[in-house]
């Protein structure tokens, strides 16, 4: 059961999403788009939830500061480097009637109609979507064969989305995989590991031992690669 509460902490107003589960014995906190999400036992009161979030105020602020700094680096605020496929690039802005982004040897060149953060972000995400779609065509053949053909199931549709709270998602029923555009900041092997992860969900919907047996059979170094995704570039 999911519920939303409101909590005022100093100058911030938080929308606290509460997910109550019968099987949970403890309370867990995470952030989604800068807002607290609490998973807790079914009988936990709203008051207890809000007191717990209030006690974690310092941690929440630290995490939001980290996310803001990472977003600035990734989306190209002035003076910051941007990571593109695991490499750090300087940025350069050029005013142009035709918008786009060029990847040179050590610089990402933004062609924008006006020199604003919003225009740079829009151009960056468009370039990321185009490159990620190319990557999917390059990488999917192996998993189409090893996962889909080997198990006699149809090939999935792969779509790009600017997801910030997860790297990918998969719908077994729709045979549809979504990949986060934020993966463009990480090395190619990370993108491939996430893609395999989502293909494995076409066979097993949960994260059971059976699921990871499939992943590790096809990519024994999966956990080493996956650890790179915890690095804030």
Image (spheres, helix red, strand yellow):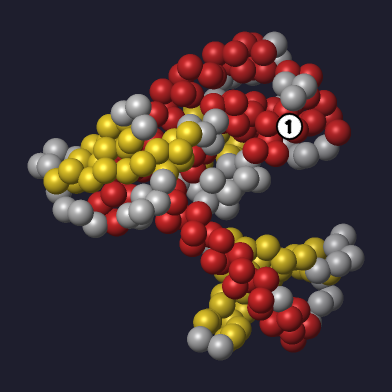
Residue 159 in the image: x percent, y percent? 46, 34
Residue 59 in the image: x percent, y percent? 67, 71
Question: Could you say which is closer to the camera, residue 137 or residue 85?
Answer: 85
Horizontal side of residue 3 vs 122, given as left or right? right
Q: From this view, report whether residue 64 is shown above or below residue 189.
A: below
How many labels, in total?
1
Residue name at image x 78 percent, y 83 percent:
48
Q: In which quarter of the image is residue 91?
A: top left
Q: Label 1's element?
A: helix
Question: Could you say which is closer to the camera, residue 100 or residue 46?
Answer: 100
Q: In which quarter of the image is residue 150?
A: top right
Residue name at image x 16 percent, y 53 percent:
114
Residue name at image x 77 percent, y 65 percent:
28
Q: From this view, report whether residue 146 is shown above or below residue 127.
A: above
Residue position for label 1: 224
* Residue neighbourhood size for the residue with mark 1, other residues' Cα within 10 Å, grouped as few (<14), some (14–19), many (≥20): few
The quarter of the rendered structure image containing the N terminus is: bottom right
Q: From this view, report whether residue 22 is shown above or below residue 136.
A: below
Horizontal side of residue 172 vs 222, given as left or right? left
Q: Quadrant of residue 125?
A: top left
Question: Could you say which is closer to the camera, residue 38 or residue 110?
Answer: 110
Horizontal side of residue 29 vs 111, given as left or right? right
Could you tell me if residue 4 is visible in this image?
Answer: no
Horizontal side of residue 226 vs 125, given as left or right? right
Residue 66 in the image: x percent, y percent? 56, 61
Could you tell me if residue 182 is visible in this image?
Answer: yes
Question: Could you say which is closer to the camera, residue 155 or residue 227?
Answer: 227
Residue placed farthest to the left in the image? 97
Residue 36 in the image: x percent, y percent? 63, 69
């Amino acid at each position: 059961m999911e519920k939303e509460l409101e909590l005022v902490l100093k100058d911030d107003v938080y929308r606290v999403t509460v997910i109550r589960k019968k099987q949970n014995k403890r309370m867990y906190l995470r952030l989604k788009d800068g807002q607290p999400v609490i998973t807790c036992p079914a009988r936990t009161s709203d008051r207890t939830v809000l007191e717990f979030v209030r006690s974690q105020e310092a941690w929440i602020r630290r995490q939001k500061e980290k996310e803001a700094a990472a977003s600035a680096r990734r989306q190209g605020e002035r003076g910051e480097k941007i990571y593109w496929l695991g490499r750090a690039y300087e940025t350069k802005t050029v005013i142009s009637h035709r918008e786009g982004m060029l990847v040179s040897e050590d610089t990402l060149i933004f062609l924008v109609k006006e020199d604003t953060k919003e225009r740079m972000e829009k151009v960056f995400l468009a370039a990321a979507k185009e490159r990620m779609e190319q990557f999917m065509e390059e990488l999917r053949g192996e998993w189409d064969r090893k996962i889909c053909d080997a198990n006699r199931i149809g090939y999935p549709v792969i779509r790009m989305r600017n997801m910030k709270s997860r790297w990918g998602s998969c719908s077994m029923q729709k045979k549809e995989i979504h990949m986060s555009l934020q993966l463009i900041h990480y090395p190619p092997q990370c993108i491939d590991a996430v893609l395999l992860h989502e293909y494995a969900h076409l066979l097993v919907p949960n994260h059971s031992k059976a699921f990871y047996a499939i992943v590790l059979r096809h990519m024994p170094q999966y956990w080493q690669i996956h650890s790179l995704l915890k690095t804030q570039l």
